[in-house]
Structure formats: C-alpha cells, structure tokens
Image (cartoon, coloured by chain):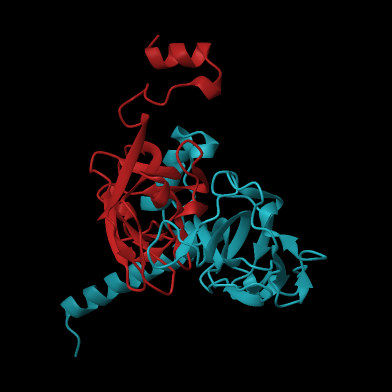
Amino acid sequence: MGLYEELKAKLPASLMPGNVGTVDNVTWDYTFPVTFNLGDNPTIGPGFRVTQFFQVQQEAAFILKNISWTANTQNAYLAPLAIELRDRQSSRFFQNTPIPVQSYGDRYLPTQLDSPLYIAPNAFVDVTMTTFIPTNVTLVGPISYTFSFRGIRIRVQDAADMLGNVFG
Amino acid sequence: MANEKDIKRLEKMVAELNKKVSAGPKPMGPAAAKPTGAPQQAVNLKNVLPPKLRPGNVGWISDVVWGYGFNAGGIILEPGRAIDSIVTVTQEAAFILTKITQTVYVRDGAPGAYTYEMIDYHDPNYEISGAYGLKFTMTDAQSGRSYMTFPEAMDNMGTGRYPYRLPTPLFFLPNSTIVFRFQNDSEHVTYMPFLTLWGVRVRLDEAGSILSTLRA
C-alpha cells in the first residue's frame, strides 16, 4: 500500500494532505506577495498610479483562494488608497472601479473569494494602486504595503490548450 | 467528353457523399467535440480538488464563474447632504451578490497626520463611535424596489476583515442598475463612504426569458 492509499484509508477527507499522491495530482499551499513601497512622505492625489504584478511560474498553475494585505505604519493603514486587479492576458478587470485597500481583509483575516480563481502557468496578474481623493495629500513617514495572494499550486497537463479557452 | 479518369473521380466523390449521408448528421454544439483544453481540465481538477478549491473560471466559456467586486460611493459627503451612487452590472455577465463591505474615510480640517488635510480611514474596529450619522439605502432601479424600509447605518455593514454576508445570495441581471443613496446626518463630520459588493459573475444563456420571471 502506498503512502497516498494509507493516508486516505486512515484520515477523514478534510485532513487529507494535498501534497501526497502522483506528481500530476498533488497540490501545495502557495503565496504570491506584491509589495508597494511608496517611500518616505509620498504625495498622493489625482493621477497617482503604481502598478506591480506577480507571475505564476511555469511549473504549476495557481488557484487563488484569498487576498490579504498589511501596512508598515498606522498612517499607511489609514491612507485613502485603492487597488485594482487585472488579468494581463485578457486585460480583464476583476472590479468595476478600484476597491479601497481597507475593503480587503488584512493580515490574518483575508478576503475569501467566493469562487477560487484559476491562473495558468506563466500568467501575469497586474495589481495597481491608485487613489480616489480629488486633491493632493502627503502621507507622513515611510509608507509601504504588501498584498498576499494566497492559494494552492497544481500541475496541469494541457495548460497550452487552455489559454484559448479559459476565461481568467 | 469525359475520359475514364474523370468518371472514376466522380464515382469516388459520389461514394464518399453516400458514405457521409448514411452516417447521419454530425452532432452540433458542445457534443460535437471530445472535451479538450479547459473543459477537460475542469474535469481533471474536479477529480483532484475538494469542492471548495475547485476554480470557477475553468470550463466552457458559457459555464465559468469568476469573482468580482462592484464599488459604490467614493464621493465626498458634507454634513446634512445626501447623494446617489449608481452601480450598473455590465452586459457581459450577471452578478450574484454574496457579501458587502463598507469603507468610510473621514475628512476634516483639523491638524492630523497629513499636511494638506486629513482624509483617513475610519476603522470601525477601533472607532467606538463608528461613522455616526452616515446611512445608506439600496434600491433596485428597474423595479424601484428598496431593500430596506429606512436608511441603514453604514456601521451595520461589514468590513474587509468581517464582511457582511447576505443570508442568501442576491442575483442581478446583466445591465441592471442598483442605486445607493448615501446620506450624512451628522452635524460636523465630512465622510467619503464606499460600499463594495462582492460576489461572482456568471454568463446567462437565457437572460431574455429570465427578465419576465425575475422578482425584481
């Protein structure tokens, strides 16, 4: 009896580890961090726009399950900033307008996606930070954010075929 | 005058046509092809992943669902004023609303962390008073139906950490419009409110016929 069969026989489904099994069927936890370092005393206002991205490595696809963020100071935590997510392959946005940073769950209480999002190997996701305030504001102190895109990795056999069909 | 070679070629063509006719019509639509690519991958993922981890955006183009957020608000709201904010579900797909979060920023002229003026997040996790006096109503524009009897306090909506999850998901057709009216009943505080509607988009084959049966 192999390890997979042994664990399957002994464990309830909720405790079955994803990283045991054949190489094409395993899954493992993964996080893509995206950092926005705005520097010291940055000025934000109309036209403020900073884009970062993450790219899923070729080895395996990524299934995005939740998003959280953290800020380095209290001023950063309170700042009037928003982010928008875009699939670079299709140019598709995942919101109608940029969503305030604070609308996302932070740290250990992330925003859970209602439907996990499949992101193909080699695909890019753009994350743009912007603001919605009508006048310039200078934030005090060093301002930095890290967004964490968490989910699982899974290998896919016909990833090339999917590019033309998959929505994401 | 046709030579022997031409006759043989025509006979071969006729034989092929007869073969096609006797085989019957080809299946149409999705049944015409063996699933490959994304549809096949959807099957593969279904076999490997537990239900809560199965991605919605893999499969036939008309069957996929994907996460989406609609924003309402984002307007500076002086004390004693009310303002409408309209959300239109884009034509591409319907929207199923599952949870709502509120984000409120406060502006005043008091010296604060910012050199120009203070516009910062009003964190209900720390501010005991909440966004006092800030209320909203939500109305379905097609039917004029309101989802609340009286304006609801923004404080009663969830936050990014603890979103307000609807008891049952709420469905909105493509092109439908939701009107939010924000009102600021406070005396001195200027707000900038946001409501973010979280949910999933889903494409509909029968949007036209649903229109007549939808509650709204």
Q: Position of residue A158 (x, y in %)?
A: 30, 46
> Can residue B19 be seen here?
no
**Residue at point 44%, 70% (across, down):** A133
Q: Position of residue B122 (x, y in %)?
A: 55, 54
Q: Residue at x 44, y 33 (%)?
A: B48
Which residue ends up furthest to the right in the rendered image?
B149
Task: Identify the residue at the far bottom of this view.
Answer: B1
Q: Answer with the quarter of the image where residue B180 lies.
A: bottom right
State the quadrant of the C terminus of chain B.
bottom right
Q: Position of residue B125 (x, y in %)?
A: 59, 44
Q: How many numbered dots are placed on residues in this image?
A: 0
Instruction: Give the left or right position of residue B146, taking residue B26 as reference.
Output: right
Residue located at (72% from left, 51% from top): B168
Q: Is residue B201 left or right of residue B116?
A: right
- Quadrant assignment for the N terminus of chain B: bottom left
Eyeballing the image, is B143 above or below B26? below
Task: Looking at the picture, tell me which residue is in the foreground, A123 or B161.
Answer: B161
Q: Quadrant of residue B23?
A: bottom left
Residue A45 seen: yes
Q: In this structure image, what is the colour of chain A?
A: red
Question: In the depicted view, which residue is nearer to us: B70 or B28?
Answer: B70
Going by the picture, which residue comes out furthest to the top? A1
Frontmost residue, A2 versus B11: A2
Q: Is residue A74 left or right of residue B154?
A: left
Q: Position of residue B137 (x, y in %)?
A: 72, 68
Vertical relation: A144 (above or below) B51: below
Display colour for chain B: cyan
Q: Give me the residue at 48% from left, 16% from top.
A: A8
Please name whichever residue, B105 or B3, is drawn nearer the observer in this view of the structure: B105
The vertical placement of A26 against B124, above or below, is above
